[in-house]
Image (tube, rainbow, N blue to C red):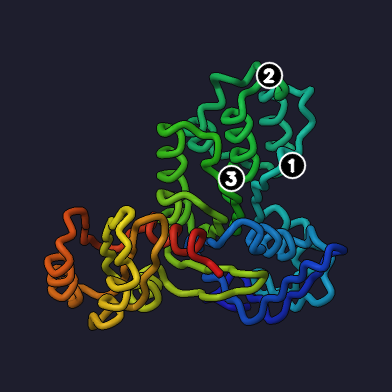
Amino acid sequence: MSQQHIIQVKQLALSFEDGTAFSFDNINISRGKITGIIGPNGSGKTTFVEAVLGLKNTSKADITIDGVTQKEFFSSMKNRKNLGSQLQVFAFSEMVKVSEMVSLHKALYGTQSKRIYDDLALAEISSKRLDKLSGGQKQRVSLFMALAHMPKLITLDEPSSALDKTMAEKLIALLKYMVAEQGCSIIIVTHHPYELDICDEVMTIYAGTKAYHETRDDFINQIIGAYHAQIFTGDQNDDPTIETAIDNIAHVKQHFRQNGQIDIFGSAEMEADFLALVKQYGLKSYSFAQTNSADILKISTSYAG
């Protein structure tokens, strides 16, 4: 059994009738960590997770989960009880009440966390039928079903989607607690900066395959650039000239131009030359700050491909 990795994907391949194909190799998801999966819409993030969970037909699948093969893992009731998954599709019968879902969960898993019940505020909706719930309330039920038994392995697909700010903050605190205090391993497919903020590792998927898999700090420092400079040029026609000047700035890792704005990523050492460029071209609107999760997501979606 691998003590370091909760999931190891040596080979995973699948294709669909429309010709879309996905191929993943040599992916190791760390045990006891939060791993964020990011990338453009349609790149294969959800497909990857669902294939690992055995929910997709694959042409190749050499996968180890918690030290055993994928087939062995899902053939064991004990292992299945150590898994919690929240998917994009709400898959429960909507004619039952929330209280009945809570009872069903207890019957299935035999254990239930009061903290998760309380933090997701299920008591206030317990008497409601699922078809009478709002989108955010349904999401809370889905999250309860995935988390309440404190599973060893958790997969979440945009978990804070439809949640209000207060509930999203409670969820983030809950996930941090589950990893730090309960030793859970969590995979999050995300488009939200506040979800990415708590990730220990980041995996990017482009065009149906893994592009990078690094710790969050290494991903920022080595792949993207620890600092993010912005120039707002509006409709100025000298953007190409400015971009040529940017190419000559030391310590720049990458830059992008879009809709009258140039984003520049690199190390802290580029600041002096960046400010000199701003002065040279008389630019009045600019910024310079540390790279954050919103920047990571912008690169992984807006600038991909």
> How far across and how far down the image is residue 50, in percent?
72, 59
C-beta proximity under 8 Å, tags 2 and 1: no
Looking at the image, residue 151 sits to the left or right of residue 79; the answer is left
Amino acid type at image mark 2: Lys
CA distance for labels 3 and 2: 22 Å
Front position among marks 3 and 1:
3
Front position among marks 3 and 2:
2
Q: Secondary structure at mark 2?
A: helix
The mark that comes first in sequence, 3 or 2, is 2
Q: Of the numbered discs in the image, which one, if any, rests on residue 108?
A: 1
> How far across and how far down the image is residue 14, in percent?
79, 70
Q: Secondary structure at mark 1?
A: helix
Q: Residue at x 51, y 74 (%)?
A: 213
Can you see residue 66? yes
The mark that comes first in sequence, 3 or 1, is 1
Task: Determine the image quadrant of residue 40.
Answer: bottom right
| Of 154 and 261, the residue lying toward us | 261
Amino acid type at image mark 1: Leu
Q: Of the numbered discs in the image, which one, if any, rests on residue 296?
A: none
Can you see residue 72? no
Q: Of the numbered discs in the image, which one, if any, rests on residue 132?
A: 2
Q: Secondary structure at mark 3?
A: helix
The mark that comes first in sequence, 2 or 1, is 1
Q: Which residue is mark 3?
A: 147
Q: Residue at x 62, y 81 (%)?
A: 26
